[in-house]
C-alpha cells in the first residue's frame, strides 16, 4: 500500500501565503506525476497543479497561474505547493494525488491512483 501524507494547511488572511507538502511512502511504486487538487462542499474535486516526475514539467489551473508554484523532491518522493497571494476563493480542502500511469489527463482526478487525506486551507477576507 502507498500512503500520501499532506501537511501545511491552515488559516491565512487574503494576500498571505502557505506551503503545502506531500510525501509518499509504502511499497514499491512508480510515479508518473504528482498533483494537487482541491474540493469544496458540494463540488467536484478540482485540478490545481501537477508535475511530471521524469521531466519536471508543470501544469496549473488558470485560476492559480502566477500565484502557485509546484515543485518536487524525487529523492524524498515529495511534492510541494507554494501558494502566494491567496484569495478567499482558494478556500478548500487540498488533496495530493499520485499518478502511476499515463492513463487519463494529468489534470483529471480519475487518473490518480493514490490520494492523501486532505489538508484544509482557509483564506479569510
Image (spheres, rainbow, N blue to C red):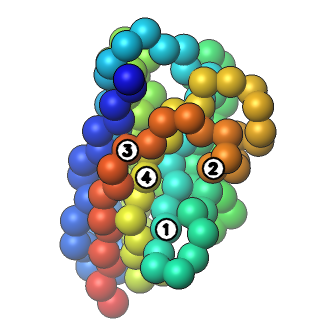
Give the residue at mark 3: 116
Q: Exactly how many numbered labels are in the figure?
A: 4
**Marks 3 and 2, the one that precedes in the sequence:** 2
Q: Quadrant of residue 125?
A: bottom left
Q: Which mark is residue 109?
A: 2
Q: Measure the C-alpha gap from mark 3 to mark 4.
A: 6 Å
**Marks 2 and 1, the one that precedes in the sequence:** 1
**Marks 4 and 1, the one that precedes in the sequence:** 1
Give the residue at x 67% y 39%.
Answer: 111
Contact? badges 4 and 1 (CB < 8 Å): yes
Give the residue at x 60% y 24%.
Answer: 100
Contact? badges 1 and 3 (CB < 8 Å): no
Q: Measure the C-alpha gap from mark 2 to mark 1.
A: 11 Å
The kind of secondary structure element at disc 2 is helix
Contact? badges 4 and 2 (CB < 8 Å): no
Give the residue at mark 1: 39
Q: Position of residue 91 (x, y in %)?
A: 40, 75
Q: Quadrant of residue 99?
A: top right
Quadrant occupied by the N terminus = top left
**Marks 3 and 4, the one that precedes in the sequence:** 4
The kind of secondary structure element at disc 3 is loop
Give the residue at mark 4: 95
Q: Position of residue 8 (x, y in %)?
A: 24, 52
Amino acid at each position: 500500500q502507498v500512503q500520501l501524507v499532506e501537511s501545511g494547511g491552515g488559516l491565512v488572511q487574503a494576500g498571505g501565503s502557505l506551503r503545502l507538502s506531500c510525501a509518499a511512502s509504502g511499497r514499491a511504486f512508480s510515479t508518473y506525476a504528482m498533483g494537487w487538487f482541491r474540493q469544496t462542499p458540494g463540488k467536484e474535486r478540482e485540478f490545481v497543479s501537477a508535475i511530471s516526475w521524469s521531466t519536471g514539467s508543470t501544469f496549473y489551473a488558470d485560476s492559480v497561474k502566477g500565484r502557485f508554484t509546484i515543485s518536487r523532491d524525487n529523492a524524498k518522493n515529495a511534492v510541494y505547493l507554494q501558494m502566494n497571494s491567496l484569495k478567499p476563493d482558494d478556500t478548500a480542502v487540498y488533496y495530493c494525488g499520485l499518478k502511476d500511469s499515463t492513463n487519463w489527463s494529468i489534470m483529471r482526478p480519475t487518473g490518480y491512483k493514490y490520494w492523501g487525506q486532505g489538508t484544509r486551507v482557509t483564506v479569510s477576507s
